[in-house]
Amino acid sequence: MKERTEQNWNGLFERYPDLLKHKSDLLEICEALRKVYQNGGKVLICGNGGSCADGDHIVGELMKGFLLKRPLPQEVQKRLKESFGAQGTRLAEKLQCGLPAISLNAHAALMSAFSNDVDPELVYAQQVMGYAAKGDAVIGISTSGNAENVANALMTAKIKGALTIALTGRDGGKIGTIADYRFIAPAQETYRIQEYHLAVYHQICAYVESELFEF
C-alpha cells in the first residue's frame, strides 16, 4: 500500500471507529477491485432507490479523477495533438484516465422493455448477462440485502465468471450470502446504512485510484 493510500485509509477509521471491525473485509474489497482494473476488467453496479443513486455516484468517482487529476499518458496526449491539432491539444489537456464502470440503472429503454416484455426482477441480471465477462466485478447495493433484482444480478455475475461484491446492512440478507465479498454496515435503519455505504465506497474509490495511478 502506498504511503498516501495508507494515510487516506487510516483516516476512514479515525472518522468511523466503529468500522474498525470491518477493516479486513474492506481491504479485501479494495484489493479485489484493484486487481480487476489492473487486469483490464470493468465494474458494473446496481441498486434501487438511494442505492441506485449510490451506483451512479460510484461511477462518477471511478470514470474520472476523484482525489487525483489522472492526466492521460504522454503517448496518448502526443497522438491526440499530432492527429487533431488545436482540438487534439484541448482533448489531450482536459481528458482524464477513467476506470471503466457502468451503472446498470442508466438504460431506461432497455429496462422498461425488459420489465414489460419479460420480468422486472431480471432487468439487472439481463444487463449483467450482456455486459459482464470473466475478470469483471459486479457490485450489488441493497440496504436490506434482500432486493431480488440485485440478487439475480449477482447470481448471473457468478455464472459469467465475474467477481461479486455486496454493500448491504442489517444481517446482510440474501446478497450477503451470494457475494464473494461483502460489507455489512453496522446499522439497521436504511438512512444510517446508506451513510456508512457513502463513506465506504468513497474510500474504496480513493484506494483503487491511489494504488493504480502515479499522479
Image: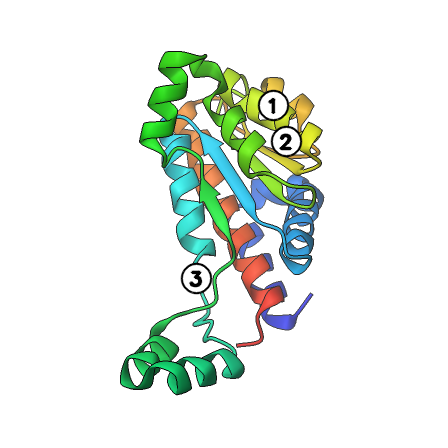
Mark 3 touching mark 2, by CB under 8 A?
A: no
Comparing labels 1 and 2, the label whose residue is closer to the camera: 2
The percent coordinates of residue 163 (x first, y second) are 67, 39
Q: Is residue 62 above or below residue 88?
A: above
The percent coordinates of residue 16 (x first, y second) are 52, 46
Q: 51 or 187, which is in the foreground?
A: 51
Kindly identify which residue carries mark 3: 66
Sooner in the amino-acid sequence: mark 3 or mark 2: 3
In the rendered image, the quadrant that contains the N terminus is bottom right
Sooner in the amino-acid sequence: mark 3 or mark 1: 3
For image coordinates 57% across by 51% down, the residue present is 13
The percent coordinates of residue 153 (x first, y second) are 56, 26
The percent coordinates of residue 191 (x first, y second) are 39, 29
- Does residue 21 appear left or right of residue 141 in this picture? right
For image coordinates 39% across by 45% down, the residue present is 57
| Secondary-structure class at tag 1 | helix
Q: CA–CA distance between discs 3 and 1?
A: 28 Å
For image coordinates 66% across by 70% down, the residue present is 2
Q: Amino acid at mark 3?
A: Phe
Instruction: Rate crowding at label 2 as few (under 14), some (14 to 19) or many (20 or more) other CA atoms within 10 Å.
Output: many
Residue that protrudes farthest toward the front in the picture: 83
Q: Amino acid at mark 1?
A: Ile
Kindly identify which residue carries mark 1: 175
Q: Amino acid at mark 2?
A: Ala
Q: 38 or 166, which is in the foreground?
A: 38
